[in-house]
Image (tube, rainbow, N blue to C red):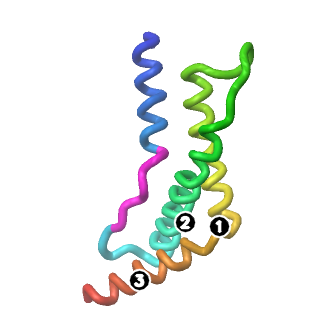
Amino acid sequence: MSDSNLIMSGTMALDTSSRAPSISKNMTTEQIRETAVEFESFFLGQMLQPMFASIDTAPPFGGGYAEKMWRSMMVDEMGKSMAQAGGIGIADSIQREILRLQEAEN
């Protein structure tokens, strides 16, 4: 794999982790809960990004493109971990709203 392909695949992996989950009709209760937790983890990751963006990395071990990519993925995983551990309550609200919207459509 060439260097440009490697960078492109790493960038695409980074992009897919920073998208909000989608909602579709006729989701099961388990799918709704999973989507709500995914949304909360996305939200928490987005809220944590600015906190870590201002941290300086000192040479010779830090900095560069790989550092930015790693840091972004680390913050996304922190958001996922926080959401799985109970989060801040957004998932519960999202789950109730999705159920309410599905009931209104029927």
Residue 52 sits in quarter: top right
For disc 2, the marked residue is 37
CB under 8 Å between callouts 3 and 1?
no
**Can you name the residue that lies furthest to the left here?**
105
The quarter in which the C terminus is drawn is: bottom left
**Start-end of magenta stretch:** 17-23
Question: Is disc 2 surrounded by few (<14), some (14 to 19) or many (20+) residues within 10 Å?
Answer: many
Give the main secondary structure, helix, strand or loop, of the magenta stretch: loop
For disc 3, the marked residue is 99
Secondary structure type for disc 2: helix
Mark 2–mark 1 Cα distance, whole angstroms, equals: 8 Å
Q: Is residue 20 magenta?
A: yes
For disc 1, the marked residue is 87
Q: Residue at x 41, y 83 (%)?
A: 99
In the displayed structure, 96 sits above or below 45; it is below
Q: Residue at x 26, y 85 (%)?
A: 105
Task: Kindly identify which numbered label has been placed on residue 61.
Answer: none
Give the number of marks.
Answer: 3
* Type of the residue with mark 1: Gly
Mark 3–mark 1 Cα distance, whole angstroms, equals: 20 Å
